[in-house]
């Protein structure tokens, strides 16, 4: 699966669990770590975990095993699929950390690739 198809699959996974304000960034030209970042948020710990669960389930259906950090606390869950890295925040943490500012040099990609 190429990185664009993986991006689309992961955006859909986030959307399936009603993640809010899904933003994607193409950082292929500026990052040696990944091709795309996705940032989204949920409004409760349970919703944040549900979004991460959906990401993991969709990845596993395509024989991918994401590295997941922060699941238990459910304030900021990182799901790393190498070509696509997803940050799933609880709303207050997203506002506080404001990761979008870090990717301002990356091309913003519409949430629906």
Image (spheres, grey):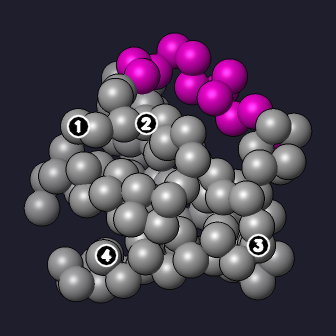
Which of the two discs, 2 and 4, labels the residue nearer the N terminus? Answer: 2
Q: Is the Cβ of the residue at disc 2 closer than 8 Å to that at disc 4? A: no
Residue depicted at 66% across the width and 58% down the height: 42
Q: Give the labeled residue for mark 2.
A: 24
Q: Is the Cβ of the residue at disc 3 closer than 8 Å to that at disc 2? A: no
Between the C-alphas of marks 2 and 4, the distance is 18 Å
Q: Secondary structure at mark 3?
A: helix
Q: Nearer the viewer, residue 77 or 18?
A: 18
The label shown at residue 45 is: 3
Work out which quarter of the rendered image holds the C terminus and state it.
Answer: top left
Q: Give the labeled residue for mark 1.
A: 113
Residue depicted at 49% across the width and 36% down the height: 23
Q: Nearer the viewer, residue 111 or 82?
A: 111
Depicted 27 relative to depicted 58: above or below: above
The label shown at residue 59 is: 4
The label shown at residue 91 is: none
Which residues lie in the magenta part?
97-108
Q: Is the Cβ of the residue at disc 1 closer than 8 Å to that at disc 4? A: no
Which of the two discs, 3 and 2, labels the residue nearer the N terminus? Answer: 2
Which of the two discs, 3 and 4, labels the residue nearer the N terminus? Answer: 3
Q: Is residue 69 left or right of 85 when viewed as pictured?
A: right
Can I make out residue 44 in this image?
A: yes
Quick one: label 2, few (<14), some, or many (20+) residues within 10 Å? many
Q: Residue furthest left?
A: 1
Quick one: label 3, few (<14), some, or many (20+) residues within 10 Å? some
Can I make out residue 83 in this image?
A: no
Front label number (3 vs 2)? 3
Work out which quarter of the rendered image holds the N terminus and state it.
Answer: bottom left
Q: Is residue 37 left or right of 98 when viewed as pictured?
A: left
Between the C-alphas of marks 3 and 2, the distance is 22 Å
**Residue 5 at x, y percent in the picture:** 16, 52
């Amino acid at each position: 699966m190429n990185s664009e198809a993986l991006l689309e699959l992961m955006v859909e996974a986030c959307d399936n669990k009603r993640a809010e304000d899904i933003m994607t960034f193409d950082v292929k030209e500026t990052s040696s770590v990944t091709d795309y970042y996705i940032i989204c948020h949920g409004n409760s710990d349970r919703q944040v975990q549900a979004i991460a669960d959906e990401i993991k389930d969709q990845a596993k259906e395509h024989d991918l095993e994401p590295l997941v950090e922060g699941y238990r606390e459910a304030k900021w869950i990182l799901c790393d699929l190498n070509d696509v890295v997803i940050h799933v925040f609880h709303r207050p943490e997203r506002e506080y950390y404001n990761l979008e500012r870090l990717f301002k040099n990356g091309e913003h990609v519409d949430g629906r690739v």
